[in-house]
Amino acid sequence: MSRHQQRRDKLRKLLRREDINAILVTNETNVTYLTGFTGDSSYLLLTADDEVLLSDPRYTTQLAEECPDLELAIRTPTINVTELTVKVLKKAKLSRVAIEASTMSVAQKDQIGRAHPKLQITNTIGLVEQLRAIKDRDEVQRIREAGRIAEKAFAVLRATLRPEQTEKQVADQLEYQMRLFGATDRAFASIVAVGPWAALPHATPGNRLIGQSPFVLVDWGARGDQYVSDLTRVLVTGKIPAKFDKIFAVVLKAHDAAIEAIRPGVACQDVDAAARKVISKAGYGRRFGHALGHGIGLEVHEAPRLGGKQKQPLKAGMVVTVEPGIYLPGWGGIRIEDDVLVTRDGHEVLTSLPNDLDSAFVA
Ligand code: ZN
Ligand code: ZN
């Protein structure tokens, strides 16, 4: 049985528990996860004992290569994907179908409802995402590889960093290097932020020069073979600013405390709390304004979320980022981010780039 077929059967099991007899999967990443098909504009209709991939003629060759075992419904150029969906739903003679409420538009849902008034449409949220949260060995390997690519590219950045470079030049260079090392893409728009701008957790790289501030924050990741990595490091490029080593030490301690707390059965909020406690105790509680981390996989933000009020327990096979930070407006910010696998008896840090203070200094 193929890996994708196994996943579809797992989804069936989950649907039975939720009393759902059919689901229309419209989230493209979920379709890829369940079928292996990497094109867009394609849906999967999955019932208790049937499945059909709705796609279009552009993809005939790719479909034959990526999911030869799947039944296909290919639309003709005269109908759109929603009209094809209605046709397939009618043919399947379903009285009820679940949809993915986070992806399907209201307009599309209305259109299906009008064309097929007898069909009962129910909303679901996050079912396939729940399966995606637990990675198998092959997925973990791909995330690990995406980490290696990001780290090799960062080593080049570190060795070639010059005061006259702009943040944007450094970000572009870093992303190009990741591609040279085997990435198919960047995992997300890289953040390269000097000094005070590092206080903005999502700063956009601009024309500010590396040399105009004593340190720079880099948050980047690679998409390797479909799966992504996500790291953050801060590099000191000039005279070390006041408070830098103290704040760095607090962030690193929070990072390590969180990783120490990671094991199956621990609530996500408790991992977040382990880091937050360290930062609060040092007096910077209000300066850590985001969740500790998030799952990574086919997407850079996926389940689970390591934040307050997240009671769900970690499970073996989850891969999460741990990224505490302290941000002082006008001064800057320090964040340290690594990718961590939940193992059966604890955790394994998948990224391997040094994160100590000494390694932050660019000679
Ligand atoms: Zn990041
Ligand atoms: Zn992240």
Image: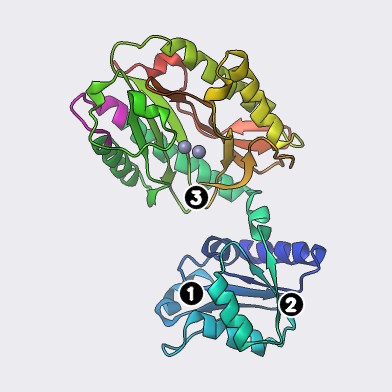
| Residue marked by disc 1 | 63
Nearest the eye: 269 or 2: 269
Instruction: Name the residue type under label 3.
Output: Tyr
User: What is the secondary structure assignment of the residue under circle 1?
Assistant: helix
User: What is the secondary structure assignment of the residue under circle 2?
Assistant: loop
Q: Position of residue 236 (x, y in %)?
A: 34, 18
Which residue is pictured at 65% across the width and 89% down the height? 91
User: What is the secondary structure assignment of the residue under circle 3?
Assistant: loop
N-term-proximal mark, 2 vs 1: 2
How many neighbours does mark 3 have within 10 angstroms: few (below 14), some (14-19), or many (20 or more)? many
Per the model, the C-alpha gap separating discs 1 and 3 is 20 Å
Is residue 113 highlighted in magenta? no
| Residue marked by disc 2 | 49
Q: Position of residue 253 (x, y in %)?
A: 57, 17
Instruction: Name the residue type under label 2.
Output: Asp
Which residue is pictured at 47% across the width and 83% down the height? 80
Instruction: Name the residue type under label 1.
Output: Leu
- Which residue of the protein is positioned furthest toward the left in this rendering? 164
Which residue is pictured at 57% across the width and 71% down the height? 106
Mark 1 Cβ inside 8 Å of ligand 2: no
Instruction: Give me the disc on residue 227.
Output: 3
Q: Quadrant of the C terminus?
A: top left
Compared to residue 181, the image places residue 211 above or below, namely: above
N-term-proximal mark, 3 vs 2: 2
Q: Which residues are magenta?
A: 157-167
